[in-house]
Amino acid sequence: MLKDKLKSYQLILASGSPRRQQFFRDLDLDFEIRLKDIEEVYPENLQGVEITNFLAELKANAFDGEITFNEILVTSDTIVWHNGKALGKPKDYNDAFDILASLSNTTHEVITSVCFKSATKMETIFDVTKVTFGLLTEEDIRYYLDHYKPFDKAGAYGIQEWIGLVGITKIEGSYTNVVGLPTEKVHQYLSNYI
């Protein structure tokens, strides 16, 4: 099992996301959480996966010189990519409303990059999932925002919440990627790490 393979390593998850932390617990991994406050700014010319790769690596590079030989640092970033634009976390209620209204009756991509950094190397993997929403009424959107307050989520929604149950009509790719971490790819990468 992966836990046994990694017993001589200390896994460090640099994420405040409760969903990513829960995924690591669900993968039955021993890990510790280390957080740094990073300004998530990227060059405007970057597109799609280039953005999430850049941000995941930016978060990892904040730990330069702090990773010991037996530690593996894991950082991650997720965006919703829609109409050639990155939709991150909403600024406020109105922004969240506008984001969800723009996703109604369309297909978008959820892109997550995961960076693995040790004392000697750094590698980044990514996953892309296509998500299609049916028609979301103004009433649907306001109900969701009022009751679930998804202001900490890229694209202003959580697929595992009410809006996902009533609004999403199709998903192509990894479900866990849309929640915030492509767990099958993380597991595969760590399984081949040694």
Image (tube, helix red, strand yellow):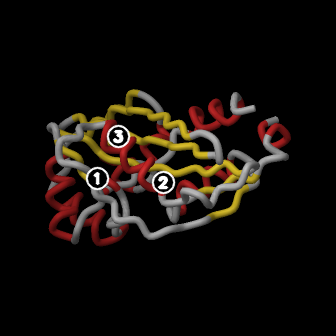
Find disc 2 in the rendering and name its residue.
61
Gap in Å between the C-alphas at discs 2 and 1?
A: 25 Å
Gap in Å between the C-alphas at discs 3 and 1?
A: 9 Å
Find disc 1 in the rendering and name its residue.
155
Image marks 2 and 1: residues in contact by CB distance under 8 Å: no
Gap in Å between the C-alphas at discs 2 and 3?
A: 24 Å
Precedes in sequence: disc 3 or disc 1:
3
Which percent across, then down, holds residue 124?
A: 49, 37
Which percent across, then down, holds residue 186?
A: 59, 38
Residue type marked 3: Val
Under circle 1, the secondary element is helix
The nearer-to-camera label among 2 and 1 is 2
Q: Residue 2: which quarter of the image?
A: top right
Vertical order, 107 against 7 (above or below): above
Find disc 3 in the rendering and name its residue.
110
Image marks 3 and 1: residues in contact by CB distance under 8 Å: yes
Q: Residue at x 55, y 40 (%)?
A: 122
Which percent across, then down, holds residue 145?
A: 28, 66
Crowd tier of the residue under label 3, counting other residues whose Cα lies within 10 Å: few below 14, some 14–19, many 20 or above: many
Residue type marked 1: Gly
Image marks 2 and 3: residues in contact by CB distance under 8 Å: no
Residue type marked 2: Asn
Which percent across, then down, holds residue 82?
A: 20, 40
